[in-house]
Image (cartoon, helix red, strand yellow):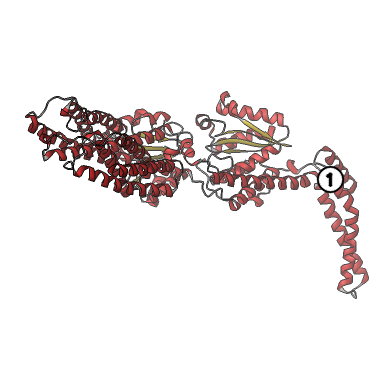
């Protein structure tokens, strides 16, 4: 079993490739089911900045081929040139870095951890996340949380929505009294709405495909609901437009917006598109007085690599290295020699039972100290006896030799299972990792 | 004496300009505050120098050197007031160097202009000249603002969020400031044209002589008139207005410099 991570992100693929690859949870479940047989434990992290497969592959070669064919069927053959790949421990490091938001476009942004948790949860639901994947993710989440509390990496990071609003102030100065139009009332839209309200934009119009959700958000933020088909009229009044729908085609194109500009008397129009795939056609900002931005642009605004941020990132990398080392150590103990645990449990059981029996034979007139001495002697005998084999097995790197030796030990002592890691065991320890409802973005 | 004072003021302005440029790179409050203080004291010293020179000339600057000196003074005075009002030290990085560039030739030129022929001493003339200079300074600042607008818009449209992007004020603010400055400059320019015509008729009986200076001024006036109309009635703003402002100012610059052409316009200001 070997780790493999294949995917693409904002670092390797432009937005128009990424938006083609953006997967809905249903689609991910579908894909997971398709690959799980041939690949092994798998999960897919899909956000507006990345689509990544993490797999504990039985055969790296086979898994790579399978994942490549899945990815090219999703994004076309061209998408293969944007892929990167990590295997073995480097895949592990990548997972830890992604979860800790060190690989994010806006380093330190908080949403990614929730998004990885969602990915794991989905894989668990579909049944493609085994115990090893769950354990690894738990370690990655723990390290991410440690980084969040021990470094200041998250402090400077701004959410996409607030960055978008900040960008709007570069056009309008104060947003007080500026009319805003929210297209899409999902999680992103809601975030944007709150920022707009605190920037005292008013009125705030809310449109959504389902009116109910629009009404809910509008009442929360003191906005007004507009029907989806009244979009053009609303655009005539609005100064700012924030789009975050799940629409797969453009809602605003040059052809739609250009005629409206005249009715707006050429007042500047600020449009921001927080959706992947995009809602606003990219050529819209060619229009005079129209300032249109997509996810990548927004993130570039905040992704200033200040020295302070870099120092915090360096601290975070150190933490990751520590956490990885710790995880790998505990994994090698776990992996190589589960038989040891069984052996020790069996021996402890025997020692305890024999001590009890001896004590019963000796009668009730023993002092507490004498009783404890008898128990200690039994424990000491098994400790001495097991010390050497335990040490020998631990010294071995977790490879085939170790497995053979562990198998032999299991047979000699009459223990039930072999030495291989419990990956064939399909039930993930759910209770151990209840992922909290996280602040993931719309995807 | 006034020359020494002028030189001190010029040094202060130059230092302030460097500080404002440094402020562009590193946004330390110290740069902005020190720049403001230097400009403020420089303006005081400059005012004394100009005042003492102008006192003996019926209150008007005579010759190109004094004209340039007065323009530099007005430029910085307008900036100083705007900075106090709106806190836009970043503008100093644009206006500061420009003012120094205007003032240096004034310092290098001889300031001992001959006294004006007594025939030109009319009560209207100081008003005409002063208002003309105020207008030019207002349009010069408006041009600086227009340049800032264009730079900012380029950053916004090109999505290159560089140093200027984080330092410059918002597009709407720059556009509004441009509107104010052009409006005031236009009023000053109109008064200049009218008083100039009256002055001209009082000296040689002609309101309009089709001199290059007059033509340039008229063209500039028309450009700004069109600009303001487009702004108020057709909703023009932003880039188009900024470009027009700069064009109008270039024409006005021709008019300003030709005022000091001794072969034309009677050489009154020589």
> Where the C terminus of chain B falls, by quadrant?
top left
Q: Quick one: label 1, few (<14), some, or many (20+) residues within 10 Å?
A: few
Q: Give the total of numbered labels.
A: 1
Q: Is residue A402 left or right of residue B174?
A: right
Q: Is residue A88 left or right of residue B51?
A: right
In this view, the residue farthest toward the left is B205
Q: Is residue A352 left or right of residue B182?
A: right
> Where the N terminus of chain B falls, by quadrant?
top left
According to the picture, the residue beneath numbered tag 1 turns out to be: A395
Q: Quadrant of residue A255?
A: top left
Q: Quadrant of residue B61?
A: top left
Using the image, determine if residue B247 lies above or below residue A389. Answer: above
What is the x, y in percent for residue B86? 32, 47
Q: Which residue is nearer to you in this view: B164 or A133?
A: B164
Q: Is residue B28 left or right of residue A75?
A: left
Q: Residue at x 59, y 46 (%)?
A: A311
What is the x, y in percent for residue B230? 22, 32
In this view, the residue farthest toward the right is A362
């Amino acid at each position: 079993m070997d780790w493999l991570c294949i995917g693409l992100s904002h670092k390797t693929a432009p937005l128009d490739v990424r938006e083609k690859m953006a997967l809905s949870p249903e689609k991910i479940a579908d894909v997971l089911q398709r690959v799980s047989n041939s690949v092994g434990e798998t999960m897919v992290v899909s956000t507006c900045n990345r689509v990544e497969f993490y797999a504990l592959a039985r055969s790296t070669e086979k898994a790579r081929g399978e994942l490549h064919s899945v990815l090219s069927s999703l994004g076309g053959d061209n998408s293969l040139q944007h892929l990167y790949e990590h295997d073995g421990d480097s895949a592990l490091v990548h997972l830890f870095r992604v979860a800790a938001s060190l690989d994010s476009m806006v380093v330190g942004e908080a949403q990614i951890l929730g998004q990885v948790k969602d990915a794991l949860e989905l894989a668990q639901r579909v049944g493609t996340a085994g115990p090893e994947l769950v354990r690894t993710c738990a370690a990655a989440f723990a390290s991410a949380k440690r980084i969040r509390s021990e470094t200041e990496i998250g402090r400077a990071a701004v959410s996409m929505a607030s960055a978008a609003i900040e960008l709007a102030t570069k056009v309008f100065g104060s947003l007080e009294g500026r009319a805003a139009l929210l297209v899409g009332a999902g999680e992103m839209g809601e975030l944007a709405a709150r920022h707009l309200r605190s920037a005292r934009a008013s009125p705030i119009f809310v449109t959504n495909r389902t009116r109910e959700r629009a009404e809910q958000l509008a009442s929360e933020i003191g906005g007004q609901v507009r029907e989806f088909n009244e979009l053009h009229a609303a655009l005539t009044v609005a100064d700012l437009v924030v789009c975050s729908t799940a629409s797969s085609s453009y809602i605003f194109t040059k052809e739609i917006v250009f005629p409206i500009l005249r009715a707006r008397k050429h007042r500047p129009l600020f449009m921001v598109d927080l959706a992947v795939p995009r809602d606003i056609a990219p050529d819209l900002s060619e229009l005079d007085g129209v300032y249109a931005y997509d996810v990548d642009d927004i993130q570039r605004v905040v992704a200033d690599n200040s020295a302070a941020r870099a120092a915090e990132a360096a601290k975070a990398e150190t933490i990751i290295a520590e956490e990885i080392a710790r995880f790998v150590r505990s994994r090698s103990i776990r992996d190589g020699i589960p038989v040891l645990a069984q052996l020790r449990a069996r021996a402890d059981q025997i020692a305890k039972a024999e001590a009890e029996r001896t004590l019963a034979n000796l009668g009730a007139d023993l002092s507490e100290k004498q009783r404890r001495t008898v128990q200690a002697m039994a424990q000491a005998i098994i400790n001495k006896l097991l010390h050497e084999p335990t040490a020998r097995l631990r010294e071995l790197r977790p490879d085939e030799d170790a497995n053979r030796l562990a198998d032999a030990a299991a047979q000699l002592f009459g223990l039930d299972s072999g030495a291989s890691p419990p990956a064939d065991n399909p039930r993930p320890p759910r209770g151990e990792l209840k992922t909290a409802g996280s602040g993931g973005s719309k995807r | 004496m006034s020359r020494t004072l002028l030189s001190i003021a010029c040094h202060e302005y130059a230092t302030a300009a460097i500080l404002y440029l440094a402020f562009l790179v590193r946004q330390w409050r110290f740069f902005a505050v020190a720049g403001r203080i230097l400009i403020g004291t420089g303006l005081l010293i400059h005012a004394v120098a100009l005042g003492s020179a102008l006192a003996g000339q019926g209150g008007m600057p005579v010759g190109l050197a004094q004209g340039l000196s007065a323009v530099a003074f007005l430029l910085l005075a307008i900036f100083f007031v705007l900075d106090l009002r709106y806190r836009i030290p970043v503008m100093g990085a644009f206006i500061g160097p420009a003012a120094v560039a205007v003032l240096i030739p004034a310092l290098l030129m001889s300031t001992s202009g001959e006294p004006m022929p007594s025939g030109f001493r009319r009560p209207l003339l100081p008003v005409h000249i002063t208002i003309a200079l105020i207008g030019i300074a207002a349009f010069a600042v408006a041009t600086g603002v227009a340049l800032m607008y264009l730079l900012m818009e380029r950053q916004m449209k090109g999505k290159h969020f560089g140093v200027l992007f984080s330092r410059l004020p918002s597009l709407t603010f720059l556009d509004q400031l441009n509107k104010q400055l052009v409006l005031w400059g236009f009023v000053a320019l109109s008064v200049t044209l009218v008083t100039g015509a009256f002055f001209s008729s009082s000296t040689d009986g002609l309101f309009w002589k089709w001199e290059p200076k007059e033509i340039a001024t008229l063209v500039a006036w028309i450009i700004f008139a069109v600009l303001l109309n487009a702004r108020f009635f057709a909703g023009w703003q932003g880039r188009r207005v900024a470009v027009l402002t700069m064009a109008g100012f270039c024409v006005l610059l021709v008019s300003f410099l030709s005022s000091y052409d001794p072969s034309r316009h009677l050489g009154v200001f020589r």
